[in-house]
């Protein structure tokens, strides 16, 4: 098996790895509610999925297309529980933000420019979730395993993009992956804090 084939398989694993992570988060929402989940983060996830799908079509890459297409429905399910129609300002604002970061550069300078812009948006869009985790102690609705899967998926994607010499996508994914790790670590810490407090209360 050639090295190209190996990295193509890695890319497909990265593509399908996004599905269980998003499903885990959706199941967490059904079980524990939306406490601690950032509306802005998940709305931007969905908007960026649309761009990545379009980018995959433009470069004729089924790996890139499926990486977003298979998670998109579950992202919409998570968003549906965040009552987006009651938060139209966030819905419209996040859409406008992604349009400025991704679509305008793509229309002006090409798809790679849009990917770099998307990379900036991918980092920024995770910041509300990071801030929410810093601000609120009780974040039962946030799934640490979902962000862990996302972190590992980012690693696989960076390996795939390196082999394909898709440097715009590489740097975009690398930045997002670093923030994924931070969110995962902070979520684990918050869950541990809550569990310790509940254990202390039960003991008294």
Image: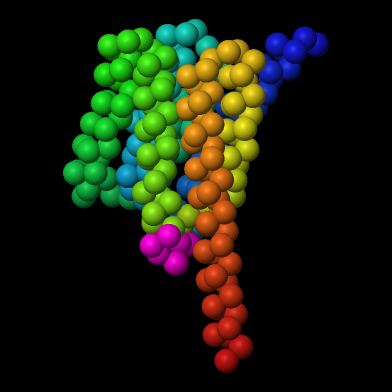
Nearer-the-camera pick, 160 or 68: 160
Q: Position of residue 87 (x, y in %)?
A: 22, 48
Q: Is residue 7 above or below residue 189?
A: above
In the picture as drawn, the residue positioned furthest to the right comes out as 1
Q: Is residue 17 visible?
A: no
Q: Is residue 129 above or below residue 9?
A: below
Nearer-the-camera pick, 9 or 188: 188
Q: Is residue 130 visible?
A: yes
Q: Position of residue 191 (x, y in %)?
A: 55, 64
**Residue 90 position by quadrant:** top left
Count of picture labels: 0
Q: Is residue 138 above or below residue 9?
A: below
What residue appears at the point 59 percent right and 26 percent down from the top-left corner?
157
Which residues are drawn in magenta?
A: 134-140
In the picture as drawn, the residue positioned furthest to the bottom comes out as 204
36 in the magenta segment? no
What residue appears at the point 50 percent right and 43 percent down from the top-left corner?
179
Q: Position of residue 127 (x, y in %)?
A: 39, 46
What residue appears at the point 48 percent right and 62 percent down from the top-left corner?
140
Nearer-the-camera pick, 96 or 108: 108
Q: Image check: 60 left or right of 13?
A: left
- Quarter of the rendering occupied by the C terminus: bottom right
**Residue 165 position by quadrant:** top right
- Quarter of the rendering occupied by the N terminus: top right
139 in the magenta segment? yes
Q: Image check: 14 left or right of 50?
A: right
What residue appears at the point 30 percent right and 17 percent down from the top-left corner?
105
């Amino acid at each position: 098996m050639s090295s190209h084939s190996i990295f193509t398989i890695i890319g497909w694993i990265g593509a399908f790895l996004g599905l269980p992570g998003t499903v885990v988060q959706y199941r967490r929402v059904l079980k524990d509610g939306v406490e601690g989940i950032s509306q802005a983060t998940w709305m931007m996830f969905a908007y960026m999925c649309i761009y990545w799908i379009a980018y995959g079509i433009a470069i004729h890459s089924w790996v890139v297309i499926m990486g977003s297409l298979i998670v998109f429905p579950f992202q919409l399910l998570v968003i549906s529980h965040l009552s987006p129609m009651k938060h139209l300002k966030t819905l419209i604002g996040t859409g406008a933000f992604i349009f400025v970061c991704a679509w305008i550069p793509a229309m002006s300078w090409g798809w790679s420019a849009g990917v770099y812009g998307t990379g900036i948006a991918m980092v920024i869009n995770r910041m509300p979730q990071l801030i929410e985790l810093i601000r609120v102690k009780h974040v039962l609705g946030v799934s640490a395993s979902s962000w862990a899967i996302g972190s590992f998926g980012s690693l696989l994607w960076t390996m795939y993009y390196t082999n394909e010499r898709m440097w715009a996508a590489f740097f975009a994914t690398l930045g997002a992956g670093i923030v994924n790790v931070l969110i995962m670590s902070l979520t684990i810490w918050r869950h541990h804090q809550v569990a310790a407090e509940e254990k202390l209360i039960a003991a008294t």
